Image: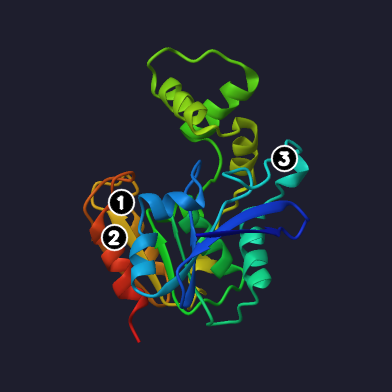
């Protein structure tokens, strides 16, 4: 697997890797993840086997990409900006590539589509309407990251403490992740109705994001599929990889 760097539109250094050969497919990872996770335990390997050139960026604040501690490095919608910069860096024109993402990655796929990205096909997996179009801040992630940044003690064995331990094991940067969360913006339902790129919306049948079908219903040209698993386990479900491969392989 080859690695390279590119820069965001503001000059921030971003990391990316790619593997396989054939039609380009950009895959976007979830919050607190990195591109390689999509290959190690997610659906990317299935695409390589089917003859795709799979491109796996690390979001800013994640993985091997820069993790600035200046809040100005995380303006609204910066992850979508970075995704569009990657398309430009690769020299990919409209229809020359496909685009997919899981969880936060799916949210950024939708943002890129709403802002004019024109892949041949798109995949938004592990995401529902409320997370895409509703308030983007708050929740357990922001609460826990704020506590870590502020040095507030977490209750032992609590869900926040377990997540904090996981972040520590990952070697992630809580302050950068908190800034990433604060940069997210919603995609209004009116904008969703204007997205015409054929899109697969996929969700685990035990995922708490139970409104993924409502997201699909708002898109002009969408397919909706449920696969076994919750938000975590569906990511690695062979049924998800199979549904994604079949969708992208349609004429």
* Camera-nearest residue between 101 and 131: 101
Seen at 59% across and 31% down, the residue is: 174
Judge by depth and name the residue closer to the eye, 82 or 187: 82
Mark 3 sits on what residue?
68
Q: Say which quarter of the image contains residue 93.
A: bottom right
Choose the circle earlier in sequence order: 3 or 1.
3
Residue found at the far left of this picture: 228
> Relative to 10, does residue 138 appear above or below in the rendering?
above
Residue 66 is labelled as none
Q: Tell me: 89 left or right of 251.
A: right
Q: Can you see residue 127? A: no
Element on which disc 1 rests? helix
Which disc is residue 236 wearing? Answer: 1
Quarter of the image containing the C terminus? bottom left
Q: Are marks 2 and 1 in contact (CB under 8 Å)?
A: yes
Label count reads 3
Residue at position x 26%, y 66% from top?
242
- Label 1 crowd (10 A; few <14 / some 14-19 / many >=20): some
Report the residue marked by disc 2: 240
Q: Work out whether mark 3 precedes mark 2 in sequence or the reverse, and give the earlier one.
A: 3
Q: Position of residue 179 (x, y in %)?
A: 65, 39
**Label 3 secondary element:** loop
Q: Residues within 10 Å of mark 2 (few under 14, many from 20)?
A: many
Question: Does 21 sit left or right of 57 as displayed?
Answer: left
Q: Are marks 3 and 1 in contact (CB under 8 Å)?
A: no
Residue 119 locus on image (x, y percent): 52, 76
Mark-to-mark CA distance, 3 and 2 = 34 Å
**Residue 118 at x, y percent in the picture:** 55, 77
Q: CA distance from mark 2 to mark 1?
A: 7 Å
Q: Image point 30% across, 62% down: which residue?
A: 241
Give me the C-alpha separation between circle 3 and circle 1.
31 Å
């Amino acid at each position: 697997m080859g690695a390279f760097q590119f820069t965001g539109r503001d000059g921030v250094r971003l990391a990316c890797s790619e593997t396989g050969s054939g039609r380009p497919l950009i895959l976007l990872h979830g919050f607190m993840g990195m591109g390689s996770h999509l290959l190690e335990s997610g659906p990317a390997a299935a695409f390589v086997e089917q003859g795709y050139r799979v491109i796996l960026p690390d979001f800013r604040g994640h993985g091997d990409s820069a993790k600035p501690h200046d809040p100005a490095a995380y303006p609204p919608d910066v992850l979508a900006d970075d995704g569009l910069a990657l398309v430009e860096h690769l020299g990919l024109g409209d229809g020359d590539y496909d685009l997919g993402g899981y969880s936060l990655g799916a949210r950024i796929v939708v943002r890129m589509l709403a802002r004019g990205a024109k892949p041949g096909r798109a995949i938004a997996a592990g995401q529902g309407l409320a997370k895409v179009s509703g308030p983007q801040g708050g929740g357990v992630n922001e609460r826990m990251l704020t506590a870590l940044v502020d040095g507030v003690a977490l209750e032992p064995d609590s869900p926040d403490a377990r997540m904090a331990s996981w972040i520590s094991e990952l070697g992630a940067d809580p302050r950068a992740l908190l800034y990433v969360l604060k940069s997210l913006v919603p995609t209004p339902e009116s904008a969703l109705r204007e997205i015409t790129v054929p899109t697969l919306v996929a969700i685990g049948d035990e995922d708490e994001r139970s409104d993924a079908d409502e997201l699909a219903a708002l898109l002009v040209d969408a397919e909706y599929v449920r696969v076994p698993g919750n938000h975590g386990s569906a990511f690695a479900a062979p049924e998800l990889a199979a549904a994604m491969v079949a969708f992208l392989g349609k004429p």
